[in-house]
Every structure is written in structure tokens, then in C-alpha cells.
Amino acid sequence: MKNNFRRRRPRTSSEEGQTFIPIVVMIAVLLLGMLGVAIDYSQLWAHRQMAQGAADAACEAGAADLYLKAIDPAAAGVGGLQTFNWIGTAFDCSTSPGTPPCSYASANGYPGPTVPGSTVNVTFPTTLAPTIPDLPAPFTTANPYIQVTVTDSVPMTFTRLLSPNPTVIINAKAVCGLVPVNMPAPLVILHTTAAGSLSVGGASKITVFGGPQRSVQVNSSAAAAVSVGSVDLSQGGPSDSGSDFGVFGGPQTQPGSILLGSTGHYISPALPLGDPFATVNAPGVPPALGSARPVPFAVNGCPDPSGCVEFTPGDYTGCNAGKNLQPGDQGCLLLPYKGSNPNFKIAAPNWVVGQTYTAGTLIQPTKNNGGNFLFIAMNSGTANGASPAWPQTPCARQPDGTCAGQTVTDGGGIQWQNVGVVASNLQLTTGIFDPGLYYVAANGFNLGDNSTVRVSTATGDGSKGVMFYFSTSATVGVTSNSGKSSACTSAANDGTSSPSGCVVSYQISGAVSSQATGYLPSQKLQCPSGVKNPSQVPAVLDGNILLGPCGLLVGNPGISGTYGSPDGNRGFLFFQNRAAAATPSWGGGGQFLSSGFMYFHFGNGATCGAGTSCLTLQGGSGSQSYTLGNIVVDELALAGNPQINMILNPAATFSALMPTLLQ
């Protein structure tokens, strides 16, 4: 039977190839398109990065000038700086190419031939709230922020085949401004133009121990802003191996007399530092008046066997600088209490029947008291009965610093203790200050020849230190012969001592002195929450000892909460009214220790004491003196041949303006 089906002939290889070629072409076109898109968007990403880098650089450059204008308008035109006239009104870099933001944008290719079709716009927002809080009142300025926007038109090579737009517009924005930044405060010299605003002359020497990496910052733009004899920073900084010396002006090369150690640097120009204490408000006038009274040796830590003037904190605005003061009067802070300075008419009031007395009151009975001894009330009450037979031997000093025996009780139940005598002529050269705020006005705080001052061991306001606020241009003045009294080798509360006119040495640990010197207690140098005493400070010191209030005390007693150091150490010792220029001076005849902040800042005038607060600081010839804490002042001069040892606080931080990239 015949097969009617025809056998199908198989395809040839040439027919199969004709099908494969279009597929390959299509895949190749697709891959090429994808590659083109990748190339276009890689270029877009690269331009975006370039534009953002240019915006950031331009913004930061502009913020640096905003910062300088805010803290030092006189810096315009100094050291290659332009004027600050470009700040405040929005502009385009095509019309203001020479301004700092535009110069930095141009260096990064915007606008210009490197990136054709691009623009750079600069604006000055007045607020960034709520994203960024507005500046607090002490830091307010007309132009706190700058915004730079870079616009770039990026051509598309392959993507344009699929899109009607031949280019893609990208925008890069950067916002910079001034923000308060917490930082440790070095020795800061705030005057912006003065030559020799930091002057260390003659054979004087300043040595810095510890503290932040920047030990010294001099803001003056003068070519000779610094004139130094010897400044040793080789033991400064966090590692005690060297710290930085920064000056905005010059000299631009490191003077050979500045020692920096292995980790220190000399930086010129160094961006000026704003006032680190700008946010600390001045104190109000205390409600109570300050007072002065004579006290015998060892009472509340009086270190002078002849007796002391004990001052209480309070308002000294209308203090009495006259003669024949009554104990408890508002006597001025002018020591010694003799000569042309104030003095007392009597050492203490008489015992009076019917008089109410509080514990701690001193009296000097005029009857049955042939030795003219002073007696202290051990408890409160109302005097009554006949005048007691007052003991004529002072109480016995005890190893714990207290005094025992020699008491009598009057008819009203008040127990009185014989605590010794004061100089019969009431010529008192030593002052002790109870802890608290001393609000000082026209007569200032002056220590004359042969005077000595210490912080008392009384409770006062609980701050364990003192702060002197100078509300007028009257300020601190210490003669070169203050703090020179010899150290006692023997001392008793009957007024005897050796050598004559001596003062018992200060124990930085707060321990009582030896039996020979009356077991005298001292207000300890270390605060309860503070760091241990610096190893550079001797255990025993002579001369003037002043301690600022402690910080971080439980319950923030007294002035500690506002004027103690935020790290628990000692805070403001001297605080000059910012609206009153002054010429504070600490002479260098004797040894001294000041622990706390010295703050004397008024302005930027040409004359010290007229438009500027200038501090003169000297140590004693042949002796070493110590300042613990920080100094912020318009100008600082060291003269003569003293050595001042500064132990800076690395932990206490305060707000200062800094230019910062914000967005």
C-alpha cells in the first residue's frame, strides 16, 4: 500500500541563525541603555557630591566671618580678612564672587567654567527654630546663621533618549551658624586690638600646670599682641606634657621664651575665643549688710595672735571707711584696720543686763575683767543678774581645733567662754572672711602693707568660699608688701607669739596646726566634690589665701549653685561688673594662693580702667605664688621678678560661641 504522507524536511542551521541575531541585538541595546543610564546617574551622583562639598566649604567659610563679626567686629581687614559688609543681605555669587563663601565655592568649581550653568546663592536666616534653638540672650547677634545653596544643571547623555529633559537640576544646601559649645576655659585675654595684651615682663615667669590642651588664648589682632618674658607650658595640658598657646595676631612665629613641651603647639593665627563666662549673670544686691568685728586668735580660724577683723558676707555698697567703728558696723574691705583705713573704737561691746545674745556673740566686759579678755556666748539667751566673775585665763586650745574650759554662766543662763584678747591698740592687720558673697562698691577691696587675708572657718552661707563682686570701677588692689608676715613658730590666744607680728601658716588639707601654734584650723583647699589638691601646691603656705565658693554642694547652699565651678571645684573668686572698667592689681611682695576664677571684662577701649579692665598680677620675689582655676580678663600683665604658678581646671566647661555646620 502506498504511503501518502510526505516526510518533513528539517530546518537548516542558517535559518536558526537568522532568529538568534535579532535577540542578541535587542539584548545588546538593552544592556547599552542600562549602561548609559548608569553612567548618567553616576555622573549625577558625582555632581551631587561635588555640589554638596562646595556648599559645605562655602558655608563654613562664611560662618567663620559671622563668628568674628559677632565677637570681634574690629577683626575686619586684619590678617587678610575682608570687611564684613557682605554679611546680612542675600546675594548670588555671580554678582559677589570675591566674598568668602563665593571664593570657597569657586575653589570647588561653583560657579565657573568647571561646572557651567551652575549658581551659588547665599542667604542669612535669622532663625532655624524649631530644628535649632535660637541663641540665648548673652549670645544674640544680628546674623547668627548663613545658608548656601548650590544649583547645578547636569546634562544627561543617554537618559535624554528616554526623556524630553536634556538635563537634571540638583540642589545642594548647607546651613551654618553660631551655637554655644561647652568647652574648658584656658587663660583668656579678650582685648581684640591691644598690643601687649598679654605681657610677661622683666624676670617674671608664668608656669602652667595641667588644664585643657589650649592653655593660653590671646584674642588681640595686633602684630605684637603678645610680649612675653618666660611662659612655661611644658607641664600643661591634659597629659601634663605640654599645651597650646594661641594668639589671633602675633608674633606669628613662636617666641623662644615660650616653652610648649612635647605635646604643645604655638598657633598663630588662632581663632579668637568668645567670653566663656558670658552666660553667667551678675549677682543681685544681697538683702543683708556686710559687717566687720574684731576677733581673737583662732576664733573662726583667725591666724593672727594679735587678733583679726572678721567680715561677714553681704552688701558693702555704703560701707564705712571712717575711724572708731563699732564692732558689727558695715566696715569697708580696707586692710589693715589702722592708719588712714578704718579702725575700731572698742574690741567688743560690754555685757549688759537684759540684753538678748545669740550664740557666737562676742563681748568685752568692763567689770571684773582686768585682762580685757573677750568672751563668746556658747548659747543664746537674755543676760541677767550681777556681772559674773569673768575668768582671766583664756580657754585651752585642743588638738581637734576646739577650745576648752574657762567658762562662766550669767544669771540669764548664758554660758560665756574666755577666747582671748585682741591687740590693745586695736591696730589689726589680718582679715578673715566668712563664706558667701561680698557685694563691693565704691571703696573696693584693698590690702595694704603688712596685711594678710584668709577665708574663715565659719559656716557663713555654706559655700566654703568667698566671691567678691565689684559693682563699680573700684576693684581689688593689693600692695607689694601684703602677705609678707612671718610664719609663727609659736602662737596662743593670749596674744603672745613668736616672732612678733607673725601669722600662722595655712594648711591646705584643712588640718589643724601644731600645738605650738595653737591647734589652729584652716578652711581646706579641696572642695567636697572637687579634685584632690594639686601636687604642685605645698602642704603649708604663708601669705594671702583666698578661696572661691565650692560647686556641686548638696542643696546648693549660698552662692555655690550659681558661682561655684560646675565640676565641683572652686568657682568665681573675683567678678567685675561688665559695665565698669577697672584696673585690678595684685602686688607681689609675699606668697599667695588664689583658688577660683578671676573675671575682669569690660570692653575694648584704648585705656585700661577707662574702656578696658586690665589685671596686673605679681608673685613674691624669692617665693612662689599659685592661682588655681581660670583667668578671663581684657589684658594681663606680669611684671617684676615673680614666679606665678597657674594650675588650670580641665574639667569645668562653659558655653562659648563657635561657628558650626548645622545642616
Image: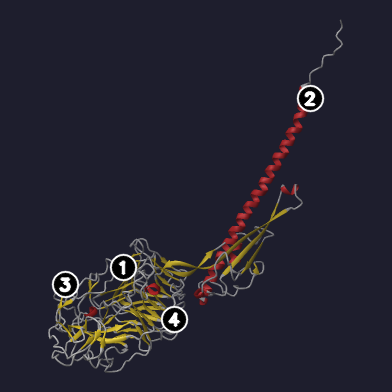
Q: Which residue type does callout 4 highlight?
A: Arg
Q: Are marks 4 and 2 in contact (CB under 8 Å)?
A: no
Residue 206, image x and y in percent?
32, 72
Residue 101, image x and y in percent?
59, 66
Label 3: state its secondary structure. loop
Label 2: state its secondary structure. helix
Q: Which residue type does callout 2 highlight?
A: Glu
Residue 570, image x and y in percent?
34, 72
Determine the residue positioned at 23% across, 89% down.
Answer: 348
Pair 4/3: label in front: 3
Q: Upstream in the sequence, badge 4 or badge 3? A: 3
Mark 1 nearby-residue class (10 Å; few <14, some 14–19, many ≥20): some
Q: Identify which residue, 463 or 88, lies in the foreground.
A: 463
Q: Upstream in the sequence, badge 2 or badge 3? A: 2
Counting every numbered tag in the picture gives: 4
Q: Upstream in the sequence, badge 1 or badge 4? A: 1
Q: Upstream in the sequence, badge 1 or badge 3? A: 3
Q: Identify which residue, 613 or 92, lies in the foreground.
A: 613
Residue on which the image places disc 3: 399
Label 1: state its secondary structure. loop
Residue 116 picture quarter: bottom right
| Quarter in which the C terminus is drawn | bottom right
Residue on which the image places disc 4: 578
Q: Which residue type does callout 1 highlight?
A: Pro
Q: Are marks 2 and 3 in contact (CB under 8 Å)?
A: no
Pair 1/4: label in front: 1
Residue on which the image places disc 1: 528
Q: Which mark is residue 15?
A: 2
